Image (cartoon, rainbow, N blue to C red):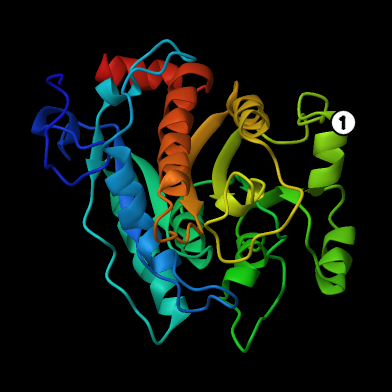
Amino acid sequence: MSEMECPGKRNFLGLSDQYSSIDKSLFDIIPVPYDATSTYLPGSRRGPRAIIDASANLELYDHQLDMEPVRAGFATLEDVPLCLGDPAMMVKAVEDVVAGVVARDRFPIVLGGEHTVSLGAVSALARKERFCVVSLDAHADLRDTYQGTRFSHACFLRRASELADWCVLGVRSISREEVDFAASAGPRIFYADSLVKGGVGAVDLDFIPGTVYLSIDVDVLDPSIMPATGTPEPGGLEWYDLLELLKRIVSGRRVLGFDVVELCPLAGNPAPDFTAAKLIYRLAGTIMKFSSNREDDRTRHG
């Protein structure tokens, strides 16, 4: 047991006060246990707690990065209060929390919940500057409305496109409406089959601008790795392919924040929860090591 860990502490990574202080930590974990517009398998409201619980069992040294990202500090905020009757109000609630995190010069990491919650983070960041939302998802989420609302999980990226530049990688399920919408925007959709067949190292990412927000739906991974999601699709990315893709997206760019959403925990199978927790920790470390944020982060956090 290291000085960084605290048994029984229910925060991301199970950290001691020294490494989970809201005053000193670089990363703010924002749980949003919301899944009111889920359409196939509900349960992503339990995702944030499952990720936090699983994270306490992660090894804090990352041998692939050769670093301990935990030393930058991870503060776990209270759950964002739910607005179950109005998804637009739920988005606003997330927006307000993320705006507060950004105002304190901290890095927001949102834990969903369904993909709708990501729009709140995008909205908060769009108050300040222009950037590109890079979504990694089995679905395009570009519908204008779905089941009577413009703020469904199936509309996340369509609404985000009204606030920021956008692209989506890993798609393998899409409607004709979404294809038609995207056709006028240029090459913004990258299908999983082309990524897998050509290799993630071969995809040209030069079109992505220098400032990004990352939104990761866990169903971008293949169901053999990530069965615990509300709308699983066959043919997804493998673990190391996803990590390589994220590294390529992050490298040399400024990352404003990220989210991991749509984990629906499965009773008796904690592996997907652990996978999601490790993905979050790895991505935080990758941003520290390879993004253009890194010099500012190292100056502030040693």
Q: 74 or 262, which lies in front?
A: 262
* Residue nearer the viewer, 198 or 115: 198
Residue 30 shown left or right of residue 41 in the figure: left
User: Which residue is at 47% across, 17% downward?
Assistant: 289
Dot 1: element: helix
Compared with 237, 288 (above or below) is above
Residue placed furthest toward the top? 66
Coordinates of residue 29 in the picture (x, y in percent): 31, 46
Residue 99 position, x and y percent, is 35, 54
Which quadrant of the figure has residue 41? Answer: bottom right
Q: Residue at x 69, y 50 (%)?
A: 166
Instruction: Tell me where residue 259 appears, x and y as whole percent.
Output: 47, 48
In this rendering, the answer to whether 202 lies above or below 269 is above
Residue that appears at 48% across and 36% down: 279
Q: Quadrant of residue 46?
A: bottom left
Q: Quadrant of residue 181?
A: bottom right
Three-letter residue code for mark 1? Gly
211 displayed left or right of 43: right
Q: Is residue 297 left or right of residue 73?
A: right
Q: Is residue 29 visible?
A: no
Q: Which residue carries the number 1 mark?
A: 198
Residue 253, position in %: x, y? 58, 27
Q: How crowded is the residue under tag 1: few (<14 C-alpha within 10 Å), some, or many (20+)?
A: few
**Quadrant of the drawing holding the N terminus:** top left
> Looking at the rendering, in which quadrant would you find the C terminus?
top left
Q: Is 78 left or right of 239, judged from the image as shown?
A: left
